[in-house]
Amino acid sequence: MLKIVLKRSGGIAYLPGLNRPIEIDTQTLPHAEAAELQTLVEKAKVFSLPRQVNSAGDGSADHFRYSLTVQNGQRQHSIRFVDPIDNEPLRALVAYIQKHGAAQPNS
């Protein structure tokens, strides 16, 4: 069981209402989606990443900034990074979370 929270801030036209955190609990997902998300988390090696992940961006106000928290039972890890995300597995995980969040009416 995973619980994931992705927060995004910054960007050229930052609008807080459009940047609400995306929260996903794999217990609420169909089995195939939960398994896919678990695989993406494992490929990104989230629990092994440092708290601050170096990304290709310079961290200027025009770039999106992210905070990702993943909880697996008692284990929890949070990381911060900026766009563009140069870590391909992390970029794939973020894209999946954002796509899932866009499909949720309350996200």
Image (cartoon, rainbow, N blue to C red):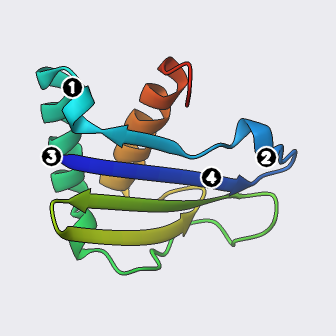
The picture quadrant where one finds residue 20 is top right
Q: Position of residue 36 (x, y in %)?
A: 18, 33
Location of mark 2 (residue) = 16
The reply to whether callout 2 and callout 3 are in contact (CB within 8 Å) is no
- Can see residue 18? yes
Q: What distance separates the C-alpha of mark 4 from that of mark 3?
A: 23 Å
Residue type (three-letter) at the residue carrying disc 3: Met
Location of mark 1 (residue) = 33
Image point (23%, 51%), residue name: 41
Mark number, residue 8: 4
Q: What distance separates the C-alpha of mark 3 from that of mark 1?
A: 12 Å
Nearer to us in this view, 2 or 45: 2
Tell me which numbered mark, 2 or 1, is placed earlier along the sequence.
2
Q: Position of residue 6 (x, y in %)?
A: 49, 51
Tell me which numbered mark, 1 or 4, is placed earlier along the sequence.
4
Q: What distance separates the C-alpha of mark 2 from that of mark 3?
A: 29 Å
Q: Nearer the viewer, mark 3 or mark 1?
A: 3
Q: Few, some or many C-alpha atoms within 10 Å of disc 3 (few <14, some 14-19, many ≥20)?
A: few
Q: Position of residue 30 (x, y in %)?
A: 19, 20
Residue 82's place in the image compared with 41, above or below, is: below
Residue 43's place in the image compared with 106, above or below, is: below
The reply to whether callout 1 and callout 4 are in contact (CB within 8 Å) is no
Q: Position of residue 89 (x, y in %)?
A: 30, 51
Location of mark 3 (residue) = 1
